[in-house]
Image (cartoon, helix red, strand yellow):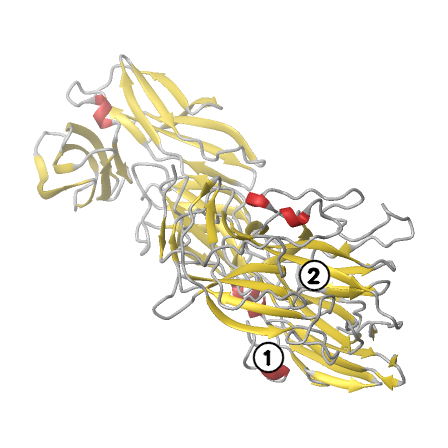
Amino acid sequence: MRYFMVVAAVLLLQPNQSLASHIIGGDISWECIQDGPDAGKFVFSLKLYRDCSTNTFVGQLEHILELHDGSNALPAILPLTLVYQTEVTAANCGVSCSSANPGDAAIEEFVFKTEPIAISAVPSSTGFRVTYRRCCRNDVDNIVNASTQEIYYSATMYPYQGRSLFPCYDGGPQFAETPIPAICAGYELRYAANAIDPELDSLSYEFVTALGNNGDPLTYESDFSYDIPFPGPTIDPSYDLVTLDPLTGLLEYVSPALQGRWIVVIAVDAWRCGQRISRTIRDMTVTAYGCTEPNNIPSVSAPTWTQPANATGYNVTVTAGDTVNFTLNGQDFDLSGVQPQEMAFTCFSNQFGAYYTNPDSGCSVLPCATLSNDIPPFTTTGTESSTTFNWVTSCDHVVQNDICANGSSTYNFMFKYQDNFCPVNGTNMVNIAVTVLADSIVPSPQPHCVNLNENGDVEIAWNPTVDPFTPPAFGAYTILHSTSINGPFIEIGVESDINTGSFLHSTSNVTAVPNLTSPNYYQIRTRSGCGNSVLESAIQTLSSIHLSVDVVNTDALLTWNAMATSPLPSSSNIYDVYREYPIGTWVLIATTADTSFTDPVFASLDVVNYRVEIKDALPCASISNVAGYLFDGISDYSLTSLILVQPNPNTGSFVVSIEGGLIKGYQLLDNSGRVVMYKNLKRATDRVKIETNLSKGSYLLHLETERGIAVKKIVVTQ
């Protein structure tokens, strides 16, 4: 069983048990608190829409929101506070909730909120689902026996990168536009719920199935389905098919001259880094009334673009830093009786500045978009409304991070024009989508070689990348290092010249020194995009070749790691095995595609060393550490093979390390067996730097380790 903690629980009272409900729609959303004493907690909201033509009162009722994890319902109770209630009835039509009679188009909105809630849990693969239920749905024309089914609304929090919901990281979409509770039969409908996401996640819309008792899908009448909720061509070929724009949520439908009532359910999903992070669902009942006079919805012309000068239509793509400027005109010259109609103009986006006029405050990301000429809310009579949109974009308008390196963000600006026709206002909504592109992204380079130098430094080589953009977008190469192929990788250096093709990971690197007893793993990634904020993914991870030598019976067993997890296209993919014997004489003894080789041991009282190389067409080569053994009948051969001396030969200064053990002390002996240097370490360590002033010649290093005594031959060249 999955357990998790809900600090301060979830929501409201008992279901209304009447068989016919006054509730004709609603949705659930949540807010992620960003600061203050409740930072990291959620506040859930429930919106309900009441048909005022019934006598049932909503007020401060009690309800229950349930939190589900997969099949396990884990409800927690928290009273809702009624934040506000307001009428959303068509303006100036003479019908209010206080005076509505059965059949009148009078609607009231209620908004409830919870206290802050901390949820310390990671959602399962199916997500945490927050639901609201009560009895009962109204009879409608597209659902079988709807009045026997309960109202069931839901919203879902999906898992994201394995993160716990506390502290919260997502606010989820919220609908800015009220539902469409009423239309005139035979008239045109253009409507958008206008979801806004506080984190600027990408949004998508789709029709989904209405839910009933226990959250089960409802059964649709023949000729209807969840994505054909209105009378359509399955009933009569002349009827219109409703459409829903998956990117803007704009619903378009020309209704036939049929009166009726239908349930329409629309889900909006929020996406981050290509992963669905949340879903909010709006359930609404739409009633078509028999309107006695003809009425056209306000007409809205396509925007007239000033910037970009070549833009057309309702969608535009710009590069961060560009200005977006257009003029939009709406008009309505219809009459109500003999009087000109009034047309109201409003618009919605979380990117508009305060009062639609301030570019420096009021929006999600500065600078804000502004309007001039007609400023919402604006009402005109018998004429047209014209507004001019202006927005200076910037790199800040592109939501970017190193995880998914988004290259663009899309902002939707919804413009709404509504007449005062009764009993149902005619509405036209148009969406202008502005996609802001980050500065161009320069690809990461192809790495080719990782070469371990004799002094312990590691040289990484790559083929410089190409920046085809004007102006140039390249920022820098970032070199990252790890001692494990699975990371974590940390930045150890930066190269700002795009023509640079190598980096030296020195033993004096201030961030991390190369590991001398195991492979070092490297990635080369480019920084580019807005403000060099995008760290592009590495093409491939390469490692240094770490060679180990062991003695098995009378053979030297050589083993090493692969330089790359998959073959490089420019590499020979063949390892050359070299042997040094006597000291100073290197001979190629084998070539192999394997990562091991056995060399027969011959009688010797001297050091036998090996190294492994793999060549690349760049040109460059990846060269391993030098590893060997001393066949003197004294040392533990297997232990000796774990000792690494870098460099060897040397000028009297060298570093000694041991794989899988600690050094306790050492002695240096000359050819006569005289001890010329010794030291007992106060604390055992896996790495010792030895500085000498020895004269040219060969010496024996006796290394005392926790695992025993090992002997290495040291050659001083000057």
Mark with earlier residue (2, 1): 2
User: Is 662 left or right of 115, judged from the image as shown?
Assistant: left
Q: Is residue 583 visible?
A: no
Image quadrant holding the C terminus, namely: top left
Q: Quadrant of residue 290?
A: bottom right
Per the image, the residue denoted by label 1 is 353
Q: Residue 25 location in percent, x, y?
A: 63, 60
Query: Local crowd at mark 1 within 10 Å, few (<14), some, or many (≥20)?
Result: many
User: Is 301 left or right of 552, judged from the image as shown?
Assistant: right
> How far apart are the alpha carbons under marks 2 and 1?
21 Å
User: Is 467 left or right of 287, judged from the image as shown?
Assistant: left
Per the image, the residue denoted by label 2 is 248
Q: The disc labelled 2 sits on which kind of residue?
A: Thr
Q: Quadrant of residue 285?
A: bottom right
Q: Residue 4 location in percent, x, y?
A: 36, 46
661, 23: nearer the viewer: 23
645, 80: nearer the viewer: 80
Q: The disc labelled 1 sits on which kind of residue?
A: Gly
- The correct choice, above or below, for 194 with respect to 309 in the image is above
